Amino acid sequence: MSDVAIGGLGLAGILVLLALRVPIAFALISVSIAGLWALLGERPALGSLRTIPYQFVAHWSLSAIPMFLLMGSVAYHSGIVSSLYTAARLWLCRLPGGLAIASNFACAGFAAASGSSVATASAMGRIAVPEMLRYRYDPGLATGVVAAAGTLGSLIPPSILMILYGTFAEASIGKLMIAGILPGILTAVIYAAMIWLRCVIRPELAPPVDINPTLRERMQALAQVWPMPLLILGVIGGLYGGYVTATEAGALGAFLALVIAAFYGRLNWAVLRASIVDTVTGTAVIFFVSIGAVMLSRFVALSGVPDAIVDLFGAGGLQGYSVVLFCGLVFLFLGMFLDPIGLMLIALPVMLPIIDQSGFDLIWFGILTIKFVEIGLITPPVGLSVYTIKTVVGDKVALTQIFRGIGWFLVCELLVVALLVIFPQIALFLPGLMS
């Protein structure tokens, strides 16, 4: 059997194991070891199992992951997130669909202090969805907006997925994070415009609320939000100005979150313990999957599968943006079945050589990759962000209602992807200024 055939058989084997619900990390590691054994023999395969995990985990840039997770956990458990939603609700409640629009922008704000889509959806789901349901909002809209806007945690910096992408693609993590700012804001604005338009056309989706806050109440609520801009400026401003690296920005963000929580008198043992447990658990999951992906990358490269796919593209006449379209379709298909980290790390070893050889900017493709992963978070049958919201709301809203509420947000996502492809400078403008 040829090396390419072994590589192809290994990739097919991973899909079979995932279909059998084998945990992603174990599926990746087991297939990679078996593949390396078939290609190189017993000793190199077992040697890879000893050396590759350590070499990957010891990568300095990955230390930003637990730091950003800690920052988001402290921000949530100390109540900073609830203050953000309260202010957005008081300022936007009089608009058609105002509570949904407030939830959308509150998700965007928390995404800038979280780094995780699932964490953003979970945190905002506990706060915003019950409030919208209390005011008789359409259940699909109430849950759909948080499930969709929660995915901004992957795009608006800091982003765990961007750290992993930058590590695998050997691209600047700092520039990747800055590149996500404008696409993230654009996505949130398009979401808000869609919600407003739908609620103007169909007022029954979002009945008027009996909230009539005074200017003083609005200003008081706004005054409670100052920790969030401080966190955002500390992290993004430090990255953009070149004062800190991505790793240092994570440490700075975690430190600022702890200081702010202490300033408010909310940094007690319960908050600290919950934040540390969330951070350790999240980091362990991410690292196990990432180790499997690194081993898969080594196996796939040695098998010659990427080179064979590049040759296949050339023979089939696929060039330029048709390659990007193909990669996007693969991401969208796999996104229906895989979680975001597993999806990205399984696909990148095969796709990055193709994109690099096609001459595309890896920063721009990184943002497109995050967008494709975002779409995977809200597409059936898996839709991890949707299931996160379902876990939060329990039996109050059926899963089918949440997926129906997602439909219009998927249309918005495809619009943003189209704009990024037509106007790459949406993603590349700010990183270009850093140079």
Image (cartoon, rainbow, N blue to C red):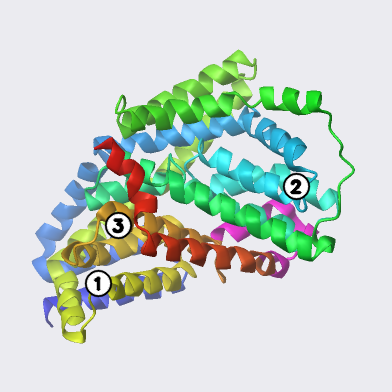
The quarter of the image holding the N terminus is bottom left
On screen, residue 346 versus residue 157, left or right, reads: left
Say how many tags the image has: 3
Q: Position of residue 186 (x, y in %)?
A: 51, 51
Cα separation, mark 2 vs mark 3, equals 40 Å
Q: Which stretch is magenta? A: 384-402
The quarter of the image holding the C terminus is top left
Q: Answer yes or no: is residue 47 visible.
A: yes
Q: Position of residue 87 (x, y in %)?
A: 71, 33
Q: Position of residue 257 (x, y in %)?
A: 52, 24
Q: Is residue 405 above or below residue 388?
A: below
Callout 1 secondary element: loop
Pointer 3 local density, CA inside 10 Å: few below 14, some 14–19, many at least 20: many
Residue annotated with mark 3:
293
Q: Nearer the viewer, residue 66 or 256?
A: 256
Q: Amino acid at mark 1?
A: Gly
On screen, residue 433 versus residue 66, left or right, reads: left
Q: Quadrant of residue 280?
A: top left
Q: Nearer the viewer, residue 62 or 184?
A: 184
Residue projecting furthest to the bottom: 316
Residue annotated with mark 1:
320
Q: Position of residue 372 (x, y in %)?
A: 43, 63
Pointer 1 local density, CA inside 10 Å: few below 14, some 14–19, many at least 20: few
Q: Which of pointers 1 and 3 indicates the residue nearer the eye?
A: 1
Among the two numbered marks 1 and 3 on one chain, the one whose residue lies closer to the N terminus: 3
Callout 2 secondary element: helix
Q: Amino acid at mark 2?
A: Leu
Residue annotated with mark 2:
99
